Image: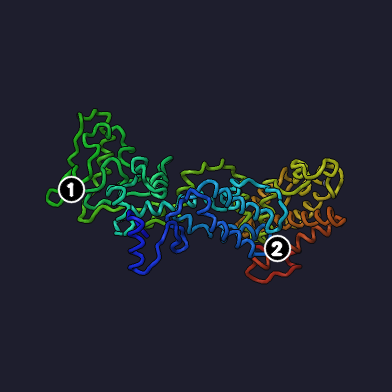
Amino acid sequence: MGINVPEDFLGMASEFLNCRVGRTPFKYLGLPVGANPRKLSTWEPMLNVIKGRLCAWGNKYVSLGGRIVLINAVMNAIPIFYLSYMKMPLKVWRELVKLQRVFLWAGLSKQTKTCWVKWDVICKPKKEGGLGVRDLRLVNISLLAKWRWKLLTTECEVWKEVVGARYGRDVIGKVNLGDIDVTRTGSCWWRDLCLLDSDVRWFSSAVGKRVGRGDSTMFWNEIWIGDQPLRQRFPRLFGMSTQQNEVICNMGSLVNGLWHWELQWRRNFFTWEEDQYNHFLDIIVQFAPTVQQDRWLWLGDGVQGYTANSAYSLVVNKLVTPSVCDPINDLVFKILWKCGAPSKVSAFSWQLMLDRLQTKDNLMKRRIIQAHHGNCVFCNLAQESASHLFLHCDRVAKVWYDLMRWLGLTVILPHNIVSSLAILVTCANNKKERAGLCLIWNAYMWVIWTVRNVCVFNNGVFMEEEVADQVKLESWKWFIGRVAKGPCMLYEWRWSPLDCLMR
Ligand SMILES: [Zn+2]
């Protein structure tokens, strides 16, 4: 490949060396080198891999719960290689989300399905009511941060030499790169890297210094003692300092092997400033220089060095506005995925709690069915909504009370779905009981929904005792299959589920 050489020389050289002339972009280790990351075409191979993988799964039936796992484990892992090298343009992200969204709701069937829950919600952690799918934009940013981290470390690497030669030696070891570090002719890759944290400067809070000699750490402006720069912690003192841009080793000296600070101030302190000044001295008095070089530290998870996980949680913390905390939601979503119900059931319950199930009122809102088809299939007296269908319908309420008697609990009919789980789990005396009651709650909701579907689509009939019995049977199956440590017979479970849970 020729760089800054005329075409005819290149021809001669290739003939002499007996090799072919290369052109950018070319592929190296599966990544396009020299390609423009802003172009959709650069990303197409990756999108094709994902589409190919989806086809390879063929027409296998995978439940919603299983599809959630596949999205997290497989679909989100394929682009990682690309995302650790190039900044993904918005249109590629949209394309990726579209593939994931369609797969989540429709599986591989070709028919289009309604997307019942917003993608933002799906990307939230499970305990906040989402599905814990990682947001690939943030994954991208956190992976690229690795390059920034590597620029701070002292290891010699060829690429750093190249970057240093091209953009100036001072970009190596510099924590805040920004507009000024990008020349007009800078490559897309470098520009993206420099502007990676331009909006909130999250990267500089991810790293700190371990001071050795103190010859490359700014006393006021860098994090080297505590968790923020001294300038931020003591703004008044900073304003009075005449050494605002000094490195540590220039602000004191060793006297008989002991470090001695030589701080200079514009004026003497007022009495009311002395407390703060003494506090400041208490903090910096701990410092003792060593013979080693100053080193950068990754503060992410207390371990030395960058990890993709710690970078991701940091980026999420800094860039995503936290959802409003609701104690009841916190409680139910935290336990929902951990109670031992099969994943398809947990996924169903998740949808139910967000009121995004295909109940008739929801279908009417989305104009999928008409109003006169909207009545409850069990009583035909009221419109079918989630709270009616699962709790307030007279016939279903009988099942609820029947089960409460079985559990030995007195729980009046809850107001809505979320509180029905919350009330039930707060009746528990310990962790095991809580998980068990959540499991039974899942069985109750799942069985009602299954029976409802049989009634709607196959002219089934609703028999209160049978349904209650079915709930006991299902929950027992899940319990012995997934939770129980020892044997537990069905008749024992029927007799006293709480005793079985405590074994
Ligand atoms: Zn009803």
User: Does residue 52 sit above or below 423 in this rendering?
Assistant: below
Residue on which the image places disc 2: 61
Q: Earlier along the polypeptide chain: callout 2 or callout 1? A: 2
- Image quadrant containing the N terminus: bottom left
- Residue 287 pos. (x, y %): 24, 48
> What residue is drawn where x is 57% and y is 49%?
123
Q: What residue type is labelled 2?
A: Tyr
For this rendering, which residue is in front, 103 or 316?
A: 103
- Residue 374 pos. (x, y %): 82, 44
> What residue is drawn where x is 74% and y is 49%?
358
User: Does residue 156 sit above or below 115 in this rendering?
Assistant: below
- Residue 237 pos. (x, y %): 27, 34
Q: SS for tag 1?
A: strand
- Residue 343 pos. (x, y %): 65, 60
Quarter location, residue 278: top left
Residue on which the image places disc 1: 259
Q: Are there few (<14), some (14-19), or many (20+) residues within 10 Å of tag 2?
A: few
For this rendering, which residue is in front, 44 or 361?
A: 44
User: Does residue 337 sit above or below 228 in this rendering?
Assistant: below
Say whether residue 231 is left or right of residue 136.
left
Q: What residue type is labelled 1?
A: Trp
Quarter location, residue 406: bottom right
